[in-house]
Image: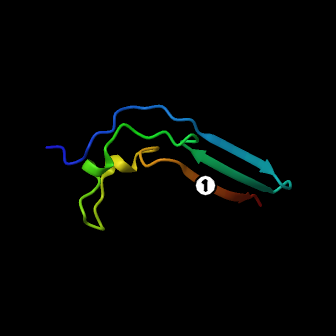
Amino acid sequence: PDFYCHVASFTTTNLNVQYKLSPNLTLRGAILNLFDKQPPIDVGTYGNSGVQTSYNASLHQAGAVGRFYSVGLNYTF
C-alpha cells in the first residue's frame, strides 16, 4: 500500500540570480515557486496527523509547500 499522498503535476516559475562582487566572490539568490502557486493537494487531509514528527514525502517535493527562498555567497580560491 502507498502510505503517502500523491501530488498531481503542476507548473511553477523559479527565479535564480547571481552577481559577481569581485573576481573571487559571487552573491547568489533563488526563489522557487516565485508566484507562490498552491499545489493540487489538501494539506489538511494529507499532512495533518497531529504528530509533531510526522513526515510525508509528498509534501517535501519541490513547490509542494509554497514559495522557497535561498541566498548564498560563493568564494573561489
Where residue 42 sits, quadrant-wise, is top left
Left or right relative to 77: residue 8: left
Residue at left offset 67%, top offset 51%:
29
Where residue 55 sits, quadrant-wise, is bottom left
Identify which amino acid the numbered label 1 is placed on: Ser
**What x and y, as percent, mark residue 52?**
30, 68
Residue at left offset 52%, top offset 48%:
67
Dot 1, crowdedness within 10 Å: few (<14), some or many (≥20)?
few
Where residue 15 sits, quadrant-wise, is top right
Residue at left offset 70%, top offset 52%:
28
**What x and y, as percent, mark residue 39?**
41, 39
* The N terminus: image quadrant: top left
Q: Secondary structure at mark 1?
A: strand
- Residue furthest toward the bottom? 52
* The C terminus: image quadrant: bottom right
Q: Which residue is mark 1?
A: 70
Left or right relative to 66: residue 69: right
**What x and y, as percent, mark residue 9?**
38, 31
**71 and 73: which is toward the camera:** 71
**What x and y, as percent, mark residue 13?**
57, 35
